[in-house]
Image (cartoon, helix red, strand yellow):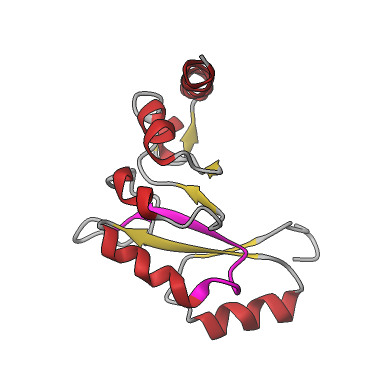
Amino acid sequence: LAQMQPDMLQLHGAETPERVAEVKARYGLPVMKALPLSEAADLERIKPFIGISDRFLFDAKPPKGSELPGGNGVAFDWHILAGLDGSVDYMLSGGLNAANIGDALRLADPPGIDISSGVESAPGVKDPALIEQFFRAVRTARNTRAA
């Protein structure tokens, strides 16, 4: 933490609300709690964290057999976020890429997005052309919405 000086800590494990509060208090930093979603009922899991987590990261539940809690390049049904309380601060993650970001922005209207594998030419290798395509798609979606 001393070297990196992050603005926020992102937690991807099975942390309880108490553990999230403990991490916040210990390090004096805001916390973003990642929660995997696949159906509307999964949104109930955020309730105990409201007022504790400063932001949420909504990612797709990992596919069966995956060793990673996130970063699997899998999207979830963004329609389920329609019932989310507008006061919940979150970032949308999971399977976002240039081909689907317009739909994600239109359907979920997220306050923020998290992109990784959708702009990689190979695992862990960011591709400048894919990054440019992604941001071009974001601008197109934003301009379409404004019109």
Where is residue 76 shown, x and y percent of the image?
29, 47
Where is residue 146 shown, x and y percent of the image?
54, 19
Residue 52 in sight from this viewpoint: yes
Residue drawn at point x = 47 percent, y = 57 percent: 85
Taking 31 as reference, is 80 left or right?
A: left
Where is residue 29 shown, x and y percent of the image?
73, 68
Where is residue 123 shown, x and y percent of the image?
40, 40
Q: Is residue 55 above or below residue 75?
A: below
Residue drawn at point x = 45 percent, y = 73 percent: 47
> Can you name the residue that lies furthest to the left here?
64
Whether residue 55 appears in magenta in the rendering, the answer is yes
Whether residue 111 appears in magenta in the rendering, the answer is no
Q: Is residue 6 above or below residue 19?
A: above
Quarter containing the N terminus: bottom right
Q: Is residue 84 above or below residue 26?
A: above
Residue drawn at point x = 35 percent, y = 40 percent: 95
Residue 121 in sight from this viewpoint: no
Nearer-the-camera pick, 3 or 81: 81
Nearer-the-camera pick, 5 or 86: 86
So how many labels did they put on this image?
0
Q: Which residues are magenta?
A: 49-61
Nearer-the-camera pick, 50 or 137: 50
